[in-house]
Image (cartoon, rainbow, N blue to C red):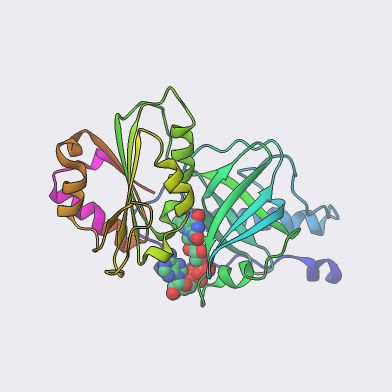
Amino acid sequence: MDNVNNELPPKPKSPSFDDCCGNGCTHCVFDIYEEEVKLWEKECLRIQTGKRNKLGNSKGLSLETYTYLKLSCIEELTQDTKNYTFQCDQLKLEPGKHLLLRWKDEGLTRQYTPISSDENSFKVLIKTYPKGRMSSYIKKWEINDEIEWRGPFGSFQYTPNLYPRICMIAAGTGITPMMPILYSILDNEKDETLIKLIFCCRTYKEILLKEQLDQFSSFWNFKVHYCLSCDNNAIAKYNESLIKSRLNANLIADKLGSSIHQTHFLICGSETFQEDIKACLKSLNVKDHSMFIF
Ligand SMILES: Cc1cc2nc3c(=O)[nH]c(=O)nc-3n(C[C@H](O)[C@H](O)[C@H](O)COP(=O)(O)OP(=O)(O)OC[C@H]3O[C@@H](n4cnc5c(N)ncnc54)[C@H](O)[C@@H]3O)c2cc1C
């Protein structure tokens, strides 16, 4: 029994109150922790009772159990940001949903939002941080590594043509939930939603997925403005729309004009970014029900 106990995975660590954003998320870090403890108890029991098959079901993702998925491709976007593609059979991901990644050796979990997917794979864009705990593992990933994922989660649901106009306001990796929504709208000829993306980045060089976003600009119903907070000298190479300033209420009003009150807003970025943008929109009399914060 001692040998078996040595094989047991570590108990998940409880999040601290600082880990909670306090926004009343439907799937909060404390909900995730409770689920993780239940999964951990189940897994310990399975190992202790001799059922040692630790591999999850390789067909599709599951909400309840982790599935080991093979990492098949790594593409470098910037020094600290890469796209990672995972193989997964029978996959059906709705746009804007996120997945939970677990690093079992530590019982550590973090959320990531696929930027694209098909029936056999999904791609996540991940920025790593020098002191980030999950980042330290992600930086060591290699092709063919098997990584644990579960999901999808999230309350966002996209219905074609529900809103005549959508304005996406994203900062940095906050672009991730916007990408599958954009693919879904622009790939559907019958979806006539007009989309404006205001993408906030520090510098021109740091604009993530720019090539893809510039390609989207050839669609009649998509327009992107790159809002650069720390790059006064940036020069548009392809006639892109650059805003060389931090985003504020006046700029949002200017870019949306009189359509602002017929627009539905999707917002994603750091907590402070989300709070700032919400305050800007409120000052422009945009109602809460016209905003979705990821
Ligand atoms: C619903 C949801 C979806 C997400 N989707 C994605 C995604 O698709 N791609 C992605 O890259 N991330 C995404 N994130 C963020 C991700 O879950 C992790 O928080 C992030 O990867 C950092 O984890 P870590 O363990 O490496 O850092 P932690 O150990 O949690 O943090 C350590 C330090 O890293 C730095 N740090 C961590 N996060 C940030 C940040 N956002 N901005 C600035 N500094 C930071 C800070 O200095 C912090 O003190 C998402 C988060 C949520 C809630």
Q: Nearer the viewer, residue 292 or 197?
A: 197
Residue 272 coordinates in the image, percent (x, y): 30, 63
Q: Is residue 184 above or below residue 133?
A: above
Q: How many marks?
A: 0
Q: Nearer the viewer, residue 95 or 56?
A: 95
Q: Is residue 27 left or right of residue 250?
A: right
Q: Quadrant of the N terminus?
A: bottom right
Q: Is residue 137 above or below residue 65?
A: below
User: Residue at image x 75%, y 65%?
Assistant: 8
Magenta stretch: dominant secondary structure: helix
Q: Nearer the viewer, residue 29 or 5?
A: 29
Q: Which quadrant of the structure image shows residue 155? A: top left
Q: Is residue 188 above or below residue 141?
A: above
The answer to whether residue 216 is magenta is: no
User: Residue at image x 24%, y 58%?
Assistant: 247
Q: Nearer the viewer, residue 225 or 105?
A: 225
Q: Which residues are magenta?
A: 276-290
User: Residue at image x 57%, y 38%?
Assistant: 93
Q: Is residue 247 left or right of residue 285?
A: right
Residue 197 coordinates in the image, percent (x, y): 34, 46
Q: Which quadrant of the structure image shows residue 89? A: top right
Q: Is residue 173 visible?
A: yes
Residue 64 coordinates in the image, percent (x, y): 63, 45
